[in-house]
């Protein structure tokens, strides 16, 4: 089962992070949380653990209107929010990968028509953001 939409782009780490934030904002998503995995691994597990992951950030993206619609229709849906978007770059790599959760995974867990509508809308928006980042 595929549970993310992914692109790989020939841009620097910081450019990829900045463009991801911008593209998400244009689709109505704000970043509620940010986890710097490399920094966390380094701090909690030591330098070697941090070095193995490369640059790796998890952005917890949320579109308030979609979240409100989803949680109103199905309160337990909040356990699946926010929509995580990963920006990662392996050590020494020349390209950066951006991955967004595929909101259709929510549909696999819920048979609600309202959840399906929210997932479809979120999916369209996240895929549009990825297309914008990649320049397509």
Image (tube, rainbow, N blue to C red):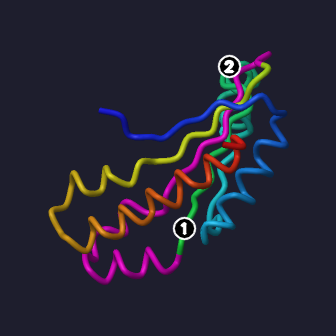
Tell me how many marks there are: 2
Q: Quadrant location of residue 9?
A: top right
Q: In this view, does 32 lie above or below 132?
A: below
Whole-angstrom CA distance, mark 2 to mark 1, is 29 Å
Q: Which secondary structure, mark 1?
A: strand
Q: In this view, does 50 lie above or below 103?
A: above
Rendered residue at 66%/43% (across/down): 136
Q: Give residue 27's position: percent from left, percent from top.
A: 61, 66
Q: Give residue 15's position: percent from left, percent from top.
A: 84, 43
Magenta-tinted stretch: 64-93
Rendered residue at 81%/33% (across/down): 11
Asked whether, in this view, residue 116 is left or right of residue 56, the answer is: left
Residue 89 sits inside the magenta stretch: yes
Badge 2: residue crowd in 10 Å (few <14, some 14–19, many ≥20): few
Earlier in the chain: of badge 2 and badge 1, it is 2
Q: Which secondary structure, mark 2?
A: helix
Tag 1 residue:
62
Asked whether, in this view, residue 72 is left or right of residue 54, the answer is: left
Q: Quadrant location of residue 2?
A: top left
């Amino acid at each position: 089962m595929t549970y993310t939409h992914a692109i790989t782009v020939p841009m620097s780490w910081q450019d990829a992070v900045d463009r991801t934030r911008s593209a998400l904002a244009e689709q109505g998503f704000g970043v509620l949380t940010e986890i710097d995995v490399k920094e966390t691994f380094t701090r909690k597990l030591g330098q070697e653990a941090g070095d193995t992951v490369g640059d790796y950030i998890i952005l917890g993206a949320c579109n308030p209107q979609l979240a409100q619609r989803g949680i109103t229709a199905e309160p337990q849906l909040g356990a699946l929010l926010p929509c995580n978007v990963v920006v990662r770059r392996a050590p020494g790599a020349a390209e950066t990968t951006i991955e967004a959760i595929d909101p259709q995974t929510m549909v696999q867990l819920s048979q609600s028509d309202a959840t399906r509508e929210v997932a479809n809308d979120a999916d369209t928006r996240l895929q549009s953001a990825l297309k914008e980042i990649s320049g397509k």
